[in-house]
């Protein structure tokens, strides 16, 4: 039996540099992990290191028509760190990047999904952000957000709090969601 496949989708935010922590934890939990990044997210990660760690290419763009997909299909998805931009586009059903296309499709497929936003107080205060968090939750997405998960910071200070980003909580949450999904299928 092959391992369950977890897509980790990474946005362009400072915690992205440490996504290997989530990848290793998920692998320890039995997942075959594939990393996708938003175009901006690619700037924050070590693509070569992630390819070596996962055994899969790091995808950021849609494949060309007629080309086979180089990644196995996902059984679950973690979006971390999730930017305000990606959360708001996802809530609106926009698929202008590979990561967003996968996320929008995953809701339709009813895949287990965990999202962990990383944002500052000013961005989080925009009315669209909490509205889209609520929408995503109503569609079955586990959104790990709030002062008990990760404190919002003042604009320009996020890099001071990177050690607090809840990678382990994201791994625990996707394991829980995947187990729930498997029990509903049987």
Image (cartoon, rainbow, N blue to C red):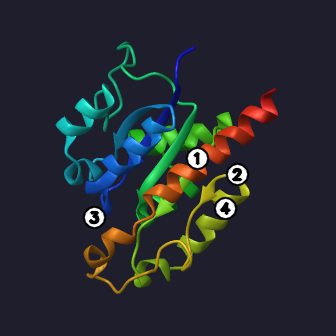
Which secondary structure, mark 2?
loop
Residue with the mark numbered 2 = 140
Write down the quadrant of residue 118 in the picture: bottom left
Write down the quadrant of residue 166 in the picture: bottom left
Residue with the mark numbered 3 = 14
Q: In front of the other: label 3 or label 4?
A: 3
Q: CA distance from mark 2 to mark 3?
A: 27 Å
Do labels 2 and 1 touch, CB within 8 Å?
Answer: no
Q: Earlier in the sequence, mark 4 or mark 2?
A: 4
Residue 64 horizontal side relative to residue 173, left or right: left
Q: Residue at x 36, y 38 (%)?
A: 35
Q: CA distance from mark 3 to mark 1?
A: 22 Å
Q: Residues within 10 Å of mark 4 (few under 14, many from 20)?
A: some
Which secondary structure, mark 1?
helix
* Whether residue 137 is situated above or below residue 4 in the rendered picture: below
Residue with the mark numbered 1 = 174
Q: Earlier in the sequence, mark 3 or mark 4?
A: 3
* Whether residue 55 is situated above or below residue 27 in the rendered picture: above
Q: CA distance from mark 3 to mark 4?
A: 25 Å
Residue 174, percent across and down? 58, 47
Residue 83 horizontal side relative to residue 17, left or right: right
Q: CA distance from mark 1 to mark 4?
A: 19 Å
Q: CA distance from mark 2 to mark 1?
A: 12 Å
């Amino acid at each position: 039996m092959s391992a369950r496949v977890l897509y980790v989708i990474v946005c362009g935010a400072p915690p992205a540099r440490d996504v290997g922590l989530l990848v290793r934890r998920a692998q320890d939990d039995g997942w075959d992990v594939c990393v996708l990044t938003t175009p901006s997210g690619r700037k924050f990660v070590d693509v070569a290191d992630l390819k070596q760690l996962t055994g899969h290419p790091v995808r950021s763009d849609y494949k060309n028509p007629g080309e086979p997909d180089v990644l196995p299909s996902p059984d679950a998805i973690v979006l971390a760190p999730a930017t305000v931009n990606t959360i708001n586009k996802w809530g609106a059903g926009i698929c202008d990047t590979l990561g967003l296309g996968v996320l929008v499709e995953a809701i339709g497929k009813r895949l287990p999904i965990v999202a962990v936003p990383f944002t500052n107080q000013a961005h989080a205060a925009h009315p669209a952000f909490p509205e889209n968090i609520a929408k995503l939750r109503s569609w079955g997405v586990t959104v790990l957000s709030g002062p008990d998960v990760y404190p919002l910071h003042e604009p320009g200070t996020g890099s001071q709090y990177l050690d607090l980003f809840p990678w382990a909580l994201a791994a625990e949450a996707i394991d829980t969601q995947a187990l729930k999904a498997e029990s509903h299928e049987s």
